[in-house]
Amino acid sequence: MFSLAQKLLNRSIISATLLLSASAAISAEKPTLTVYSYDSFTSDWGPGPKLKQAFEQQCQCTLTFVPFEDGVTMLNRLYLEKGGKADVLVGLDNNQLANARQSGLFAENNVDLSQLALPIEWQDRTFMPYDYGQYAFIYDQQKLKNPPTSLKALVERQDLKVIYQDPRTSTVGRGLLAWVNTVYPQDQAENAWKTLAKHTVTVGKGWSETYGAFLKGESDMVLSYNTSPLYHQIHEQKDNYAAAEFEEGHIVQIELAAKLKKSQQPELADQFLAFLLSSEAQKTIALHNIMLPVIKTEVEPRFDQFTPFKTLAIPFPSSDDSKAQIQVWQQALSQ
């Protein structure tokens, strides 16, 4: 016969077991939202972890980020999977828009876009902006005292060691592709790439790799964004990094998010996209992705005082244009 103490102990064990089972059942019932993005967005120092924490508190769901080296690689993976494994894609840009539209993999969203504040009016209902910036070459002011003042000067300056990203795998590389093809006439672009190749240290697959190499001192300048020095100022208290301002003007990149037609969680996907435009998310993205917010909101004094460079263009190249430009770039580097 069980003693009273044993009976109470058994009841406690049973109650604890039932509580754990109920908790596990509730956890198992939580829907999962799968978001593809690029590695610097999802990294510990990127906005991904903070966005995940904040959104999960709102949605009672599990947000899973799947990182890729860059936006181009991510989109190519999506093509191979035929859009069947992700709910949302974060990290496309205006240079990829034509290809993304033609894929037929994305669905219109139900997000209120009236609050957007961009350099251009945005009307697309499928691809939603979440930040933007201007491409620029970054340098260390303590090491480089006479930075080039134009893109043409950068191309010609053989004394400068340069790093940029591969336009076949990197959205930032695509930005330089658009920049060169905007500044140079069509019949001069190949020559410009050849000249630049003579003092290019490396052409990397993605931004993280190339910017890291620059910080290690492997080049004088690296292709990034004119907001990049803000990262060093805000997070490292360093003022030695600067963006070279070019007289021709700077190409603008608008980063985009979209939900997949085959999403298993379409309503949750819309909820996440709407969350990305909230003041809380926009501040997190600006401070950790070091890009400008797409709505009018206060971020941080240095961000709020930031003045963009002269805007050269916001390119929206067709698939054929992109293919032709990449082919010219490849031909120039292979000779």
Image: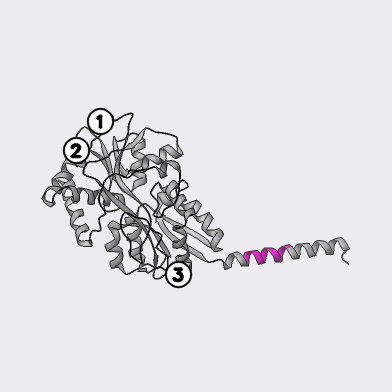
- Residue 321 visible? The answer is yes
Q: What amino acid type is highlighted by mark number 2?
A: Ala
Q: Residue lying furthest left in this view?
A: 187
- Find the magenta span and give its range: 16-24
- Quick check: marks 1 and 2 in contact, CB under 8 Å? no
SS at mark 1? loop
Within the image, what quadrant is residue 22 found in?
bottom right
In the shown orientation, is residue 91 left or right of residue 52? left
- Locate the C terminus by quadrant: top left
Q: Nearer the viewer, residue 162 or 107?
A: 107
Q: Where is residue 290 in the image (x, y as percent from the top left)?
A: 40, 46
Q: Position of residue 181 (x, y in %)?
A: 19, 51
Q: What amino acid type is highlighted by mark number 1?
A: Asn
Q: Where is residue 176 in the image (x, y as percent from the top left)?
A: 25, 48
In the shown orientation, is residue 231 left or right of residue 156? right
Within the image, what quadrant is residue 154 found in?
top left
Question: Which residue has dot 3 on it?
Answer: 266
SS at mark 3? helix
Residue at 29%, 51% (x, y): give it: 252
Residue 153 disc label? 2
User: What secondary structure is the magenta-colored segment mainly?
Assistant: helix
